[in-house]
Image: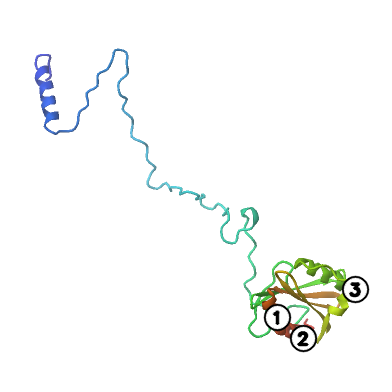
Amino acid sequence: MLTMKNLPLFLMGVVAFSACGGDDIQVYRIAKGEAGPVARAPAATEPDFAPKMGEGQMPEGHPPIGGGAGAGMGGMQAPPKSSEPVPVDGVPGMGWKIPKGWTGEGAAGMRLATFRYAGTETTVIALSGTAGGDLANANRWRGQIGLPPLGEAEFEKTSEFVQSGVGRVRVLDYKGVEKSLLGGFVLVDGQTWFFKMVGSAEGTKKAKPGFLELLKSLKPKA
């Protein structure tokens, strides 16, 4: 039992233990009315079963946000394109044969089909009626590649025609500053079918034989 009589001996033992390399013991001189060091409780730890959130990690089940793969404007996810191959014989309302070496994609939005070859992209859409007329649509396409509009006479002069199973198809060949365009118009059963290829001047030149082959292969399809 520690008493006032043996207190000096106890204090001497504490000092001797510290000098011999035991655990460091800090001695504080506390002024009158000054608070001493406050012992801090150990920080609480998360239970083992609690999931820890990483930087940028969202709670389970939260929809993806941000500019990840496939994200569109504002971080919204762009609708995926159909991965189904385009049938060789076309789509309802129009048949065709895909040129050798071309690849096709299924419908996406207004596009009934999309073809790719030699760095070019060919899209197919169909609109009711004349859709404003061939001249208006040709000038709209010319504007997309930085070319001025044409008058009626010049438009007729620069048009070509190929014969297909659905009638005569008007063919356009325009070379812009950075891109070139090949186009085809044909009116079938009250609908105008538009075939538009866009790419570099070199790419459209290489792809033109196949483009004409595609237009010539057009046929009615139930």
User: Where does label 2 land, which residue?
Assistant: 216
Q: Position of residue 153 (x, y in %)?
A: 90, 76
In percent of the image, x 88 and y 78: which residue is there? 156
User: Where does label 1 land, which residue?
Assistant: 205
The quadrant in which residue 213 appears is: bottom right
Q: Quick one: label 1 or label 3, which is nearer the N terminus?
A: 3
User: Where does label 3 land, which residue?
Assistant: 152
Above or below: residue 47 compared with residue 97: above
The quadrant in which residue 219 appears is: bottom right
Asked if the residue under mark 3 is in contact with the one under mark 1, i.e. CB atoms within 8 Å, the reply is no
In percent of the image, x 63 and y 83: which residue is there? 101
* Residue at the farthest top position: 32
Q: Amino acid at mark 1?
A: Lys
Q: Position of residue 19 (x, y in %)?
A: 12, 29
The span from disc 3 to disc 2 (Cα, nearest Å) is: 25 Å
Quadrant location of the C terminus in the rendered image: bottom right
The crowd level at tag 3 (other Cα within 10 Å; few <14, some 14-19, many 20+) is few
Q: Position of residue 41 (x, y in %)?
A: 33, 31
Q: Amino acid at mark 3?
A: Glu
The span from disc 1 to disc 3 (Cα, nearest Å) is: 25 Å
Q: Amino acid at mark 2?
A: Lys
The crowd level at tag 1 (other Cα within 10 Å; few <14, some 14-19, many 20+) is some
Above or below: residue 73 compared with residue 195: above
Pick whichever, 1 or 43, lies toward us.
43
Q: Quick one: label 1 or label 2, which is nearer the N terminus?
A: 1
